Amino acid sequence: MVQSPGFFEAFRRLRVLVIGDVMIDRYLSGAVDRISPEAPVPVVHLRSRDSRLGGAANVALNLSALGAKPYLCTVVGEDDNGEQIAQLLPEAGLSTRGLVRSAERMTTVKTRVLAANQQLLRVDQEDTHDLSDRETAQFLSTVRGILEQRDIHAILFQDYNKGVLSEMVIREIILEAVKRDIPTVVDPKYRNFWAYKRATLFKPNLKEIRAQVPMRVEPTLESLLEANAYIHRKLDNPITLITLSDKGLFISDHHEHYLLPTEARAIADVCGAGDTVVSVAALGLAQQLPIREIAALANLAGGQVCERVGVVPVDRAQLMREFHSWKAREQVKG
């Protein structure tokens, strides 16, 4: 048996506040044996329905799989899908303490129609406008209540641009984190990309960076360092972590920078890999690990979940084994 590094056990003592957009990932699966006479589209004979927690809830599930205690804070609708989220959370071992229900918006649902393991269609139900003043006040009160009642070791912002993370919500929660000396980790999207000033660790992907900075960005160390300098000037963030898809990831702080390639894997599905990467990075940051170890853990975890079909949380035991192997290779190099 591979002996776990001490920080894996320490993850069990960590409590992480997860702020962001939660949704239902719904799957309608069936078989296709003919084309519709009404239009040139396949007819799917429905055989199963499956509804899973998605969005920021997948981050919470990854944190839980690694042994940490997540507190998920979000706003969903006062509708049947919002009720389903309220039921799915405790079934997954997650608290509903941070769940705010609102009549002013619908719950986000992404419905995928599948046949023979192929996605034929996706239908989205969602509101993407920012929280209203009333929703914002209620949501911030809920978040502050958890911060008052629980000893939180990190705050993670998981943004899908569905309206929960407005500029005001981002600003107020980062201020709370700064006052309480709690590190913050951000997985941004295009809207409000530059609103996360003074976040501790900022984790965009390469596509998002390219859409936001004025220079051309390539997955090379020189190019990424230039982009990182621009990000730091805008956000004053101590650490930047940029995911590079099949090229691995880049991480930098004020003293060190690394470009880590991906491990060789049989890729089945990349969905949810970003959620896993940011979850692992948040725990590594809360545990004050060296940034190279944070990057290695996140890189290994993100690659691991790509080997399985669908959005799945990280496997803690497999991550321990893979990190042990990586560490052994590093020692041989050094």
Image: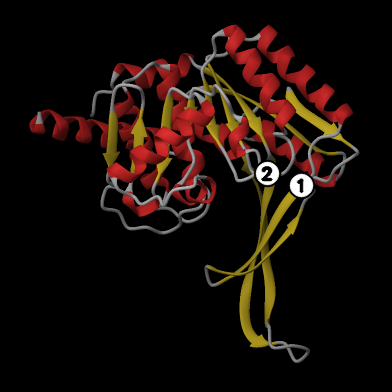
Residue type marked 1: Thr
Image position of 293 (left or right of 312): left
How far across and down, in percent of the image, does residue 325 sit? 20, 35
Quadrant of residue 129 within the rendered picture: top right
Color scheme of the displayed model: secondary structure
Image position of 146 (left or right of 202): right
How far across and down, in percent of the image, does residue 314 sit? 44, 39
Image position of 105 (left or right of 158): right
Front-most of residues 105 and 212:
212
Badge 1 density bin: few <14, some 14–19, many ≥20, Cα 10 Å: some
Residue at the (64%, 43%) spot, across then down = 160
How far across and down, in percent of the image, does residue 2 sit? 23, 28
Q: Are marks 1 and 2 in contact (CB under 8 Å)?
A: yes
Residue at the (38%, 36%) spot, across then down = 298
Front-most of residues 322 and 230:
230
Quarter that holds the C terminus: top left
> Residue 260 has which mark?
none
Quarter that holds the N terminus: top left
Residue annotated with mark 2: 161
Residue annotated with mark 1: 128
Residue at the (80%, 46%) spot, across then down = 81
